[in-house]
Amino acid sequence: MKQLKPVNRNRPCATDVVLDAMADRRLRVGELSTDDEAEVLNFLNRRPTHTFGLNGFIRANGLVNPQNRGTYYACRDVEGRLQGVALIGHHILFETINDAAIGEFAKLAQACPRAYVLLAEREKAELFWQAYAHGGKAMRVLCREWLMEQRWPVAVSETIPDLRPARLEELELLAPAHAQIAFQESGVNPLETDRAGFLARYSRRIAKGQTWVWIDQGKLIFKADIVCDTAEVIYLEGVWVNQEVRQQGYGHRCLTQLTRHLLHRSKAICLLVNENYTATQNFYGKAGFKMIAHYDTIFMQEK
């Protein structure tokens, strides 16, 4: 987790030339509707491993839903063909085939007071921030991350018979672990800043069977959350191992058992890990994950 100085938006920037080059007056941006869902999913499925965030919200909630905590937008050329899709709100996520579309989405995000976190491939995140920084929120925390992926074959290890989907009555046991992960990455504990909203969102995730756990004698040992679940890729987040049992192989057994189970219905499993967390990278590497791309997660200051 890297702390950065606020951007001076009044100082001329050498990247202004880059932004001018990115401008394309032929592009048009507009909100998407439920009628556009099939077209959008087809566009995102060109690169399913890199569109897990956008795909995940649509698969879970649909294209238009308050639970997305934002609005889906399309960027189109003069012939109406999609050049990019973005979710602008609490999360800023986008997929483009035209760099100029990144600049268009950045302009939209500048006017979004709810913008909290940006996630994108590193080069695209840098282009977005060049266009966004001079009129948007300041950068609070930058996390450099690896996108890691696992495919068949998966190493066989001793199974954990009690690894299973979580139950709603276990929410109070699971929420502190999930909040701990959020605090470690962002510096903000959602149980303190938005307890009711955080618990409501996590309970919906549990109710949908997206959270897997191993609970032994009332103690949480392992948990992992499925955010995107398609035939092409399943994205995991919130992988947590109880500190009391780390380095004993339990986390490895749970993770490999879960990924073997999930790979029966999807071609790949992916997740993000901070590039500074060497031990965590080794943990996933031992379980068969390989680094395939560099990502940036940017947390923003409140204005």
Image: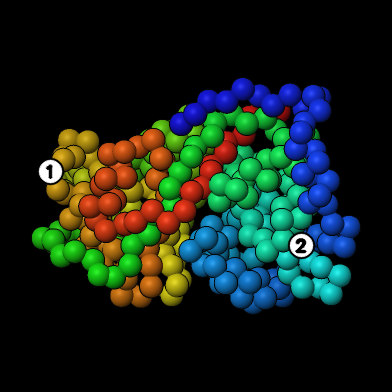
Q: Secondary structure at mark 2?
A: strand
Q: How is the image coloured?
A: rainbow
Residue 53: x and y in percent read 53, 57
Q: Is residue 186 left or right of residue 54?
A: left
Q: Secondary structure at mark 1?
A: loop
Residue 149: x and y in percent read 38, 59
Residue lying at 28% horizontally and 52% vertically, measured from the top left: 285
Identity, as a three-letter code, of the amino acid under mark 2: Cys
- Quickly name the residue at label 2: 75
Q: Is residue 147 left or right of residue 141?
A: left
**Discs 2, 1 touching: Cβ within 8 Å:** no
Q: How many marks?
A: 2
Q: Is residue 286 left or right of residue 127?
A: left
Residue 85: x and y in percent read 68, 62
Q: Is residue 190 left or right of residue 95?
A: left
Mark 1 residue crowding within 10 angstroms, few (<14) / some (14–19) / many (20+): few
Residue lying at 77% horizontally and 73% vertically, measured from the top left: 81
Q: Examine the rendering and report whether any part of residue 24 can be seen.
A: yes
Residue 158 sits above or below residue 183 on the image: below
Identity, as a three-letter code, of the amino acid under mark 1: Gln
Residue lying at 38% horizontally and 53% vertically, measured from the top left: 291
Question: Which image quadrant for residue 136?
Answer: top right
Please state, as top left, top right, bottom left or bottom right, where the C terminus lies in the image: top right
Residue 231: x and y in percent read 43, 75
Decide which of tag 2 and tag 1 comes sooner along the chain.
Answer: 2
- Quickly name the residue at label 1: 248
Badge number at residue 272: none
